[in-house]
Amino acid sequence: MFKILLLWCTVFFTADNVRQNYIQNYKDLAIVEMNRTGIPASIKLAQAILESSSGTSVFATSSNNHFGIKCKTYWKGDKYYHKDDDLNDKGELIKSCFRSYATVVDSYIDHSNFITQSPTYSLIFRQENQDYRTWAEGLQYYGYATDPGYAAKLISIIEANELYVFDK
């Protein structure tokens, strides 16, 4: 029983340390992007933490994609293929095309550009209340992710890690 408890504590605290290190490493970049585009730093960090498992996911480690952004038809940059949620005509899971970046900075910048230049997300910027909750709910509503609990997950990450302090 003691070994199980020790293993659980080790896993929990290691994951928390990875997340805290991620926040420390990228908070300034998130703030720079917030000042450039108006996307709250808390939202950017929460999305990156969720989408990249604090920089440890296969997308983050193989392609510097910290936001899970798919290629789209107009993407001209490097690509990374991974099974996600795309199906072929027979209903079989196929590899999806994801954007690949030379650096994490490129990923953060492209995420900002993707959000600000897409007509789909432009309505979020028009909301009277621009807090992280509005953003999280807007991203879910306008389809950033297929997960119906996406907004709740972002809000939970923001509040558990007090990421809202970076929005000021």
Image (cartoon, helix red, strand yellow):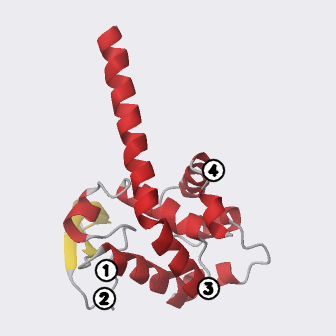
Residue 111 visible in the snapshot: yes
Q: Badge 3, how many Cα within 10 Å: few under 14, some, many 20+?
A: some
Inter-mark Cα distance, 1 to 4:
31 Å
In the drawing, does residue 117 fall left or right of residue 2?
Answer: right
Check disc 2 and report the residue beneath it.
Answer: 75
Inter-mark Cα distance, 2 to 3:
19 Å
Q: Nearer the viewer, residue 99 or 107?
A: 107
Inter-mark Cα distance, 3 to 4:
25 Å
Question: Which of the two discs, 3 and 4, sits closer to the camera?
Answer: 4
Secondary structure under the numbered disc 1 in the rendered image: loop
Q: Badge 4, how many Cα within 10 Å: few under 14, some, many 20+?
A: some
> In terms of sequence position, does the residue under pointer 1 or pointer 3 come before the other?
1
Callout 1 touching callout 2 (CB < 8 Å):
yes
The residue located at (36%, 59%) in the rendering is 52
Which amino acid type corresponds to the residue marked 4 in the rendered image? Glu
Quadrant hosting residue 50: bottom left
Q: Nearer the viewer, residue 32 or 82?
A: 32
> In terms of sequence position, does the residue under pointer 4 or pointer 2 come before the other?
2
| 145, above or below 98, in the image | above
Secondary structure under the numbered disc 4 in the rendered image: helix
> In terms of sequence position, does the residue under pointer 1 or pointer 4 come before the other?
1
Check disc 3 and report the residue beneath it.
Answer: 122
Callout 3 touching callout 4 (CB < 8 Å):
no
Check disc 4 and report the residue beneath it.
Answer: 159
Which amino acid type corresponds to the residue marked 1 in the rendered image? Cys
Q: Quadrant of the N terminus?
A: top left
Quadrant hosting residue 124: bottom right
